Image (cartoon, rainbow, N blue to C red):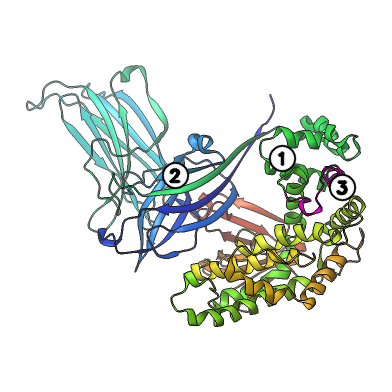
């Protein structure tokens, strides 16, 4: 038997919602809507807020490795009012995810109430014994602990009610102590029940059912968290010591829902991509690895392992991602891209259609640029985009989207200013383009010019199609997907990014003699503003430099590039022997050189940890601090304990 590792990945696109109910059930009253993506009610991501609508369009995609077992993937729909109020949710069982794999599907939005929010499990030990003094039969129930209980408004102060029902209708109950501020409480309490047939009000009875109900201890009215029912008939043959999943209340009263009724026609469009890989030990893949690494030299290339895998696997992306990682690790990605590109260009008759399809080589190029070019992308775009997020100048130029046509000219100037900043950042970044990308662009340029010697523009267009259309433009359109920001993006800024991205996409046409194609009349002025001799020359010079040689001189990487930043909760260092070791939120920034943290974003760092001083990063068990998602950064002199916001961030 082999030690098989299971790796799960989720990619989910939250499209749009339809027919949401108005506030106070008034169809004319709009809402400010956002969605929260959760694994068993643990928030993982949230979308931007779409204001003043009952049919919001989000168009946001999230992807992550699943770090733990889960029962439900849920998307909660919220209304941002004075407080965030849940409208409803879509919940998909883990075992049903494959049913919706890679399909756009409209899911009904269901009401949210305590019964729909039940999650977690309870560890019970149930046994029967005889009371030696009275001869009566005794039932012993030990409630050891619970795991992953539902949070109620971010809190959980759980307690349990243990009830035993007899066959004659008699009921006895016990209650545990309240455990404060934990959704994984340890009770370790024992309760005993005895059959007492001396009570004349009841007939002779036997054990019928054990019911363990969990509640959150809330002021005024306890919140139901779930229950477990264990049948006690036939108990002589069995004693139980096991984990039980909590279930919704059986035959209970109807809980009040959020805003939705059961017959509400509200729905949410999702596209779920869920993969489960079972990974054998590395040596079991030696033969396959050898075939993949031989692919660049196999003739014809269509008989190579890489090409055949691209044909067999339904999704080109699923084939490209692992192939790129293997070939990158072994230094074979550039010759592989060149071999595939040579075969693909040989079939093309129109130079304008080179690499415009979703072929294996195009997807492999996308993946290489994403991996090798992330630092370059951050360094080039982040300063200009941060200005867009900070200033939030209106840039809408579509007459059908503005109430006052007089503002269009001002908005146009704002948009031109933002595009010019990004244009300048891109075209002045050629010397910073990673070596690997330059090598690939050089090979593509050489191939295109050899197959189309009479086309003087193809040397530029074959490169611009990748660097502008498939690298810079998608990052501008979805900056959160490329870790260019962790902030929520409002609808106005989202629209600004869309307009900037449209203009940047058109830059690939500046290198050709053709006038840029314009699908929207309102964008004509923008395209004309950047279709000048100065801009054309700048783009061509940029493309010349990044594709000029397969071994360009690279800059010295003295400038730190931000890889990730955001808020983590930090345990105080406790340098004093009797100092308080409390937890405080700090703003962390990870770069290619160091890890720093400060009190708030933009403030001076309180601490700087060079990456060379980090010996290890390890997960910390919850029992250590009674907190979820803890990990430690081990340094030579001390250990830094941190808490992430969720299991994915950890």
Name the main secondary structure of what is drawn in magenta.
helix
Horizontally, residue 137 falls left or right of residue 320, namely: left
The residue at 79%/64% (across/down) is 512
Q: Write down the quadrant of residue 77 in the picture.
A: bottom left
Determine the secondary structure under disc 3: helix
Determine the secondary structure under disc 1: helix
The residue at 92%/52% (across/down) is 450
Callout 3: 10 Å neighbours few (<14), some, many (20+)? many
Q: Write down the quadrant of residue 56 in the picture.
A: bottom left
Q: Is residue 37 above or below residue 486?
A: above
Horizontally, residue 563 falls left or right of residue 303, namely: left
Q: Are marks 1 and 2 in contact (CB under 8 Å)?
A: no
Residue 576: x percent and y percent?
Answer: 58, 71
Horizontally, residue 582 falls left or right of residue 534, namely: left
Residue nearest the viewer, comparing 5 with 269: 269
Q: Name the residue tied to disc 3.
A: 338
Residue nearest the viewer, comparing 133 with 432: 432
Question: From the viewer's perspective, is the residue at label 1 or at label 2 nearer?
Answer: 2
Q: Name the residue tied to disc 2.
A: 106
Count numbered badges in the picture.
3
Callout 1: 10 Å neighbours few (<14), some, many (20+)? many
- Alpha-carbon span between mark 1 and mark 2: 28 Å
Q: Is residue 198 above or below residue 414?
A: above
Look at the image and say whether residue 535 sits in the magenta stretch. no
The residue at 74%/76% (across/down) is 424
The residue at 36%/49% (across/down) is 266
* Residues in magenta, as a range: 330-356
Residue 255: x percent and y percent?
Answer: 25, 47
Q: Is residue 573 visible?
A: no
Q: Is residue 354 above or below residue 400?
A: above
Q: Name the residue tied to disc 1.
A: 319
Residue 196: x percent and y percent?
Answer: 17, 26
């Amino acid at each position: 038997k082999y030690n098989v590792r299971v790796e799960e990945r989720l990619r989910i696109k939250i499209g749009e919602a339809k027919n949401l109910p108005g506030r106070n059930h008034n169809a004319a009253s709009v809402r400010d809507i956002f969605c929260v993506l959760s694994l068993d009610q643990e928030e993982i991501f949230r979308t931007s807020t779409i204001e003043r609508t009952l049919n919001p369009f989000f168009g946001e995609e999230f992807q992550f490795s699943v770090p733990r077992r889960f029962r439900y993937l849920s998307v909660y729909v919220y209304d941002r009012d004075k407080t965030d109020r849940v409208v409803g949710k879509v919940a998909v069982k883990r075992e049903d995810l494959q049913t919706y794999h890679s399909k756009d599907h409209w899911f009904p939005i269901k009401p949210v109430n305590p019964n729909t929010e039940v999650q977690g499990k309870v560890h019970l030990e149930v046994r029967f014994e005889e009371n030696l003094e009275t001869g009566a039969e005794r039932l012993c129930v030990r409630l050891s602990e619970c795991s992953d209980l539902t949070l109620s408004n971010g809190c959980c102060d759980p307690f349990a009610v243990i009830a035993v029902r007899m066959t004659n209708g008699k009921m006895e109950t016990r209650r545990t102590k309240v455990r404060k501020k934990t959704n994984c409480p340890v009770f370790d309490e024992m309760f005993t029940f005895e059959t007492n047939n001396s009570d004349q009000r009841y007939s002779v009875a036997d054990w019928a059912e054990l019911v363990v109900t969990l509640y959150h201890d809330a002021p005024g009215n306890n919140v139901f968290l779930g229950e477990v029912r264990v049948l006690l008939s036939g108990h002589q043959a069995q004693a139980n010591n096991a984990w039980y999943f909590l279930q919704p209340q059986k035959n209970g009263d109807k809980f009040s829902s959020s805003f939705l009724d059961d017959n509400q026609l509200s729905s949410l469009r999702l596209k779920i991509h869920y993969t489960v890989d079972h990974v054998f030990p590395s040596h079991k893949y030696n033969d396959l690895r050898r075939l993949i690494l031989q692919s660049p030299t196999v003739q014809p290339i269509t008989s190579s392992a890489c090409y055949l895998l691209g044909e067999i696997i339904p999704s080109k992306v699923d084939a490209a991602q692992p192939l790129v990682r293997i070939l990158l690790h072994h230094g074979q990605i550039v010759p592989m891209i060149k071999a595939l590109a040579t075969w693909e260009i040989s079939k093309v008759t129109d130079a304008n259609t080179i690499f415009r399809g979703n072929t294996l080589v195009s997807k492999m190029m996308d993946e290489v640029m994403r991996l090798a070019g992330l630092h370059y992308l951050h360094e080039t775009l982040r300063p200009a985009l941060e200005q867009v997020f900070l200033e939030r100048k209106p840039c809408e130029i579509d007459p059908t989207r503005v109430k006052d046509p007089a503002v269009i000219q001002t908005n146009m100037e704002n948009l031109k200013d933002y595009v010019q900043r990004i244009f300048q950042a891109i075209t002045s970044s050629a010397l910073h383009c990673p070596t690997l990308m330059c090598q690939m662009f050089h090979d593509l340029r050489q191939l295109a010019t050899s197959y189309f010697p009479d086309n003087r523009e193809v040397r530029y267009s074959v490169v611009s199609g990748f660097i502008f259309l498939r690298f810079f433009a998608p990052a501008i359109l979805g900056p959160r997907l490329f870790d260019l920001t962790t902030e929520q993006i409002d609808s106005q800024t989202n629209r600004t990014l869309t307009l900037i991205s449209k203009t940047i996409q058109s830059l690939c046409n500046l290198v050709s003699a053709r006038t840029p194609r314009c699908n929207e009349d309102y964008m004509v002025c923008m395209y004309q503003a950047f279709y000048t001799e100065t801009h054309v020359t700048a783009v061509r010079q940029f493309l010349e430099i990044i594709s000029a040689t397969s071994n360009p001189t690279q800059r010295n990487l003295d400038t730190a590039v931000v890889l990730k930043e955001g808020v983590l909760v930090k345990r105080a260092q406790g340098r004093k022997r009797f100092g308080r070791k409390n937890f405080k939120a700090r703003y962390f920034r990870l770069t290619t050189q160091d890890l720093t943290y400060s009190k708030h974003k933009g403030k001076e760092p309180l601490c700087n940890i060079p990456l060379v001083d980090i010996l290890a990063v390890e997960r910390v068990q919850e029992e250590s601090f009674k907190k979820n998602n803890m990990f430690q950064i081990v340094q030579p002199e001390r250990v830094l304990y941190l808490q992430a916001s969720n299991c994915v961030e950890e």
